Image (cartoon, helix red, strand yellow):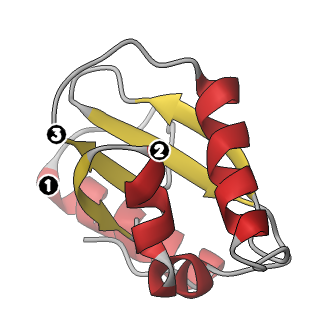
Amino acid sequence: MIVTLNESFELDPIVVRNAINLAFRNAKLKRIQIATIAKAQFSDNIIITIMSQCSANDVMQHHHIIKSVISSKNITKDERLYKVIAHGVSKTLHIMTELKSEIEMYNDVHLN
């Protein structure tokens, strides 16, 4: 999940994570638990990773709890991101199009 902050501030990820998890527990939502929080390097965003026993949809239903701990403009579900490193591949448009097609076909993903 991505949280856009209202203002930039120093962030102690463990303190913020623990505060959000405590707020979820106090709201009797013990299944929802934040695993990690990280500050984005070039923006006023933080990235929240949730534990596997809940989904981003579960957290989005209770986004007001996160907003009660962190002053934020927006909370959104992120999309799966993939990083691909291809060594020794020509950078021509034809080759890159073919490479994209093969990555999608062999990994059952759709790349934009």
x then y, percent, for residue 82:
50, 54
Q: Secondary structure at mark 3?
A: loop
In the picture of the structure, the residue carrying the numbered disc 2 is 47
Question: Label 2 is placed on what type of residue?
Answer: Ile
The residue that disc 3 covers is 6
Image quadrant in which the C terminus is located: bottom left
Which circle, 2 or 3, is nearer the viewer?
3
Please give the label number shown on residue 49.
none
Q: Which mark is residue 93?
A: 1
Q: Nearer the viewer, residue 12 or 35?
A: 12
Image point 79% across, 66% down: which residue? 25
Q: Position of residue 89 (x, y in %)?
A: 40, 38
15 sits to left or right of 68: right
Q: Can you tell which of label 3 and label 1 is closer to the viewer?
A: 3
Secondary structure type for disc 1: helix
Viewer-nearest residue: 60 or 99: 60
Q: Label 1 amino acid?
A: Leu
- Of the two numbered discs 3 and 1 on the same chain, state the one appearing first in sequence: 3
Question: Rounded to the nearest whole Å, what is the CA distance between mark 1 and mark 2?
Answer: 33 Å
Mark 2 residue element: strand
**Marks 3 and 1 close (CB-CB < 8 Å):** no
Q: Residues within 10 Å of mark 3 (few under 14, many from 20)?
A: few
Whether residue 87 is visible, yes or no, is: no
Left or right relative to 112: residue 64 = right
Name the residue rendered at 48%, 87% in the picture. Answer: 61
Q: Position of residue 14 (x, y in %)?
A: 70, 27
| Contact between labelled residues 2 and 1, with CB atoms less than 8 Å apart | no
Residue type for callout 3 = Asn
Query: What is the spatial separation of the Cα atoms under label 2 and label 3, in whole angstroms?
Result: 15 Å
* Outermost top residue: 10
- Of residue 44 and residue 16, the one placed in the foreground of this image is 16
